[in-house]
């Protein structure tokens, strides 16, 4: 999504950066794991397909993706950014008739910039760790689909939820990704 193509979000322990082509080889390596494929309901892709997917996630108007970096490693300018990768955060605008509804894989950004009013998380029925995590984040079970073997959890962003999310992310700083990367290399 173009809205985050140059956005860096810095918290206490992690830094979120746009998903760039330089991240693809490490991401692809992760996604070759059958366990990760099962937990994320993903199909294996070739490296070329993964690059195409990265371009899609960057260009499409209905996807917002960040790579999660370990801040302590990343702050050491001598460590390549790809070696700091620990995960990703995805928001998918799933309903063209309702731009305030978003599916996400992990709760982090989206409320203030995108105007999202409801989050959905679709999780494999056997992935109890993720189900428990989203329930801890105040998501409620909305439906179970036996055909796809997944549960849909939802959280509506009312004023109290919005306030809590803003308080929980008050220490997150938004910065220009390209400028920060340039400065990071200059300080090595």
Image (cartoon, helix red, strand yellow):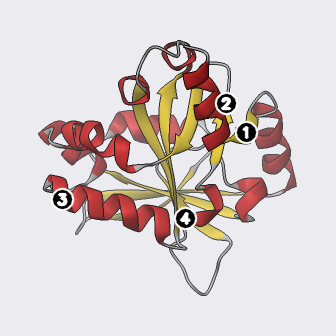
Separation (CA) of disc 2 from disc 4: 19 Å
Q: Which residue is mark 3?
A: 48
- Measuring from the top left, give residue 47's x and y in whole percent: 17, 52
- Measuring from the top left, give residue 12's x and y in whole percent: 67, 19
Is 107 in front, or is 69? Answer: 69
- Residue 38, label in figure: none
Residue 111, by quadrant, is bottom right
At 20% across and 62% down in the image, what residue appears? 49
- Residue 10, label in figure: 2
Q: Which residue is mark 4?
A: 1
State the SS at label 2.
strand
Q: Residues within 10 Å of mark 1 (few under 14, many from 20)?
A: some
Is 7 in front, or is 37? Answer: 7
State the SS at label 4.
loop
Mark positioned earlier in the residue sequence (2 or 3): 2
CB atoms at circles 1 and 2 under 8 Å apart? yes
Separation (CA) of disc 1 from disc 4: 17 Å
Q: Residue furthest front?
A: 186
Q: Residues within 10 Å of mark 4 (few under 14, many from 20)?
A: some
- Measuring from the top left, give residue 19's x and y in whole percent: 45, 48
Q: Which residue is mark 1?
A: 175
């Amino acid at each position: 999504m173009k809205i985050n193509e140059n956005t860096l979000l810095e918290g206490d322990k992690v830094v979120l950066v746009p998903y760039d082509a330089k991240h693809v080889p490490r991401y692809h390596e992760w996604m070759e794991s059958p366990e990760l494929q099962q937990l994320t309901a993903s199909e294996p892709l070739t490296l070329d397909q993964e690059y195409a997917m990265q371009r899609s996630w960057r260009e499409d108007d209905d996807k917002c993706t960040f790579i999660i970096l370990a801040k302590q490693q990343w702050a050491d300018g001598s460590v390549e950014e790809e070696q700091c990768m620990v995960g990703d955060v995805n928001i998918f605008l799933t309903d063209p008739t309702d731009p305030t509804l978003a599916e996400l894989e992990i709760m982090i950004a989206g409320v203030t910039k995108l105007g999202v009013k409801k989050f959905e998380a679709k999780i494999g029925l056997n992935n109890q760790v993720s189900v428990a995590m989203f329930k801890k984040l105040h998501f409620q079970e909305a439906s179970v689909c036996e055909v796809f073997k997944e549960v849909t959890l939802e959280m509506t962003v009312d004023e109290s939820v919005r306030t809590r999310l803003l308080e929980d992310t008050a220490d997150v700083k938004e910065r220009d990704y390209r400028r920060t990367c340039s400065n990071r290399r200059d300080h090595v």
